[in-house]
Image (spheres, helix red, strand yellow):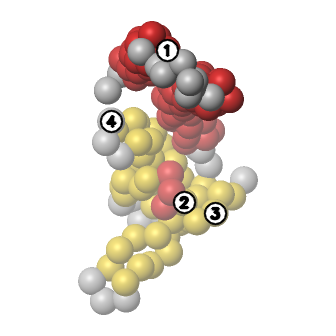
Amino acid sequence: MSSESTIQSASNLQMDYMKLLVTQLQYQNPLEPLDNNDMATQLAQFSQLQQLESINSNSQSINSTINSNFAKVLGTVGRTYANSLIGRNISFLVSTDTDGYKEMNGTVKEVFNDPEKGSLLIVNTEDGSDYTVGVDGVVSVKS
């Protein structure tokens, strides 16, 4: 349900209540009139409901904006960090068949951005092998 339809539904509910209230007032027993306090309380509750729905709608919009901007900023920061590693010596972990992980050293020679995996580093090791390493796989950076 969209925020506009939610707010509209609260307004419609309030209007329906007002119609019902007017009808009750027209047909009430003059010897037993409706309690004014009850009517005022119910109207205040409808007003609060409408305000809460509006606040909820606004907060959802704000959250959506924050989330989309945060992802953009985080991606930019990650790429900037990855680019700063070009030419630097790093230590990184490589998965092995026997020991689980092995720490290796090498020089970052290239950075590229994979749409699914984020920034990836091409690291050249001392033995001339190239490894593709995610930024989160970097253990340490040396000058």
Cβ–Cβ below 8 Å for labels 4 and 3? no
Residue drawn 61% across the image and 40% down it? 81
N-terminal label among 4 and 3: 4
Q: How much space separates mark 2 and mark 1, taking CA atoms?
A: 75 Å
Q: Amino acid at mark 4?
A: Pro
Q: How much space separates mark 3 and mark 1, taking CA atoms?
A: 78 Å
Q: Amino acid at mark 1?
A: Leu
Cβ–Cβ below 8 Å for labels 2 and 3? yes
Residue drawn 51% across the image and 57% down it? 136
User: Which residue is labeled 1 in the image?
Assistant: 25
| Badge 2: residue crowd in 10 Å (few <14, some 14–19, many ≥20) | some
Q: Is residue 123 above or below residue 40?
A: below
User: Which residue is labeled 2 in the image?
Assistant: 138
Q: Amino acid at mark 3?
A: Ser
How far across and down, in percent of the image, does residue 31 sit?
56, 24
- Of the pair 29 and 24, the residue shown nearer to us: 29
| Badge 3: residue crowd in 10 Å (few <14, some 14–19, many ≥20) | few
Q: Amino acid at mark 2?
A: Val
How far across and down, in percent of the image, does residue 79 sit?
53, 35
Residue drawn 72% across the image and 53% down it? 143
Q: How much space separates mark 4 and mark 2, taking CA atoms?
A: 19 Å
N-terminal label among 2 and 1: 1
Q: Is residue 99 above or below residue 103?
A: below
Q: Secondary structure at mark 3?
A: strand
- Of the pair 142 and 16, the residue shown nearer to us: 16
Q: Is residue 103 visible?
A: yes
